[in-house]
Image (cartoon, rainbow, N blue to C red):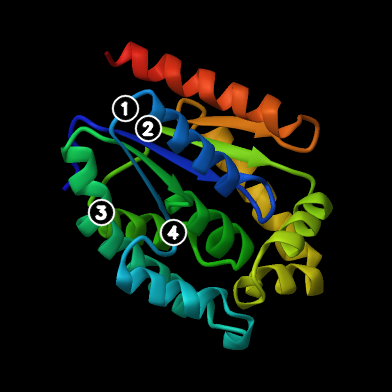
Amino acid sequence: MNNKGPGFFITLEGIEGSGKTTHARRLFSFLEEANVPSLLTREPGGTPVGEKVRELLLNPESGAMDPLTETFLLEASRREHVTEVISPALQAGKVVICVRFTDSTLAYQGYGRGVPLSHLHCLNNIATGGIVPDLTLLFDVEPEVGLARSFSRTEEKELRFEKEFLANKEFLLAVRDGYLQLVKEYPHRFMVVNTTEHSKEEVFALVRETIWQKLEKRG
């Protein structure tokens, strides 16, 4: 499955409240208006199975979960997502916009939970069949700002991680630092966008221009 086809795969990453979903929706609308065949999806989720896993993982009522159990649930959702949604869309030549992907697992379960990165790389590769994003936008935000935004916008049934962050700020900081470490390891793939210092319009203008330039280069 590692032949991802003629499409273009964009992932949006970042801690809670960083603006991923907002800008993913805006980018999808922009590409649709420009008549660029596109798909907007998310993780965990994206399929009926994935959405059930999402309900379980993000609901505060699920409580504490063994890090490997959490990882296996995410990877199961991802496998279904890639085989049923992402890979077919890329094979059809679409621009796929995905809110969260393998980097989230490395940041949260690896740098945050302490699951060995070697295990996660292996599981990610199995789940994706080797598919790697063409571009990853990391929306970086000050943790306190991001949490405040997320609590004001997210439904109670999806606040499991936010509530854990409030109780354990070190976890949140480790996740953010993990993302920044991934940027250093894969600079050719990542683009960091600061959403604390810039307005939504400034951020989206940068995202729009970056994506458009890359799509033009690909013809």
Distance from label 1 to label 2 (Cα)?
6 Å
Rendered position, 89 above or below 168 = above
Mark 4, secondary structure of its residue? loop
Q: Nearer the viewer, mark 2 or mark 4?
A: 2
Q: Residue 149, position in %: x, y? A: 76, 55
Q: Amino acid at mark 4?
A: Glu
Residue 216's place in the image compared with 161, above or below, is above
Q: Which residue is mark 4?
A: 43
Tell which tag, 4 or 1, sits nearer the viewer.
Answer: 1
Distance CA(mark 4)–CA(mark 1):
22 Å
Task: Give the SS element for disc 3.
Answer: helix
Residue 68 placement (x, y as % from top left): 46, 76
Q: Amino acid at mark 1?
A: Val
In space, the residues marked 3 and 2 are separated at their CA atoms by 18 Å
Labelled disc at residue 32: 2
Pointer 3 residue: 85
Mark 2 / mark 4, whichever is N-terminal: 2
Q: How many marks?
A: 4
Q: Are dots 3 and 1 in contact, CB under 8 Å?
A: no
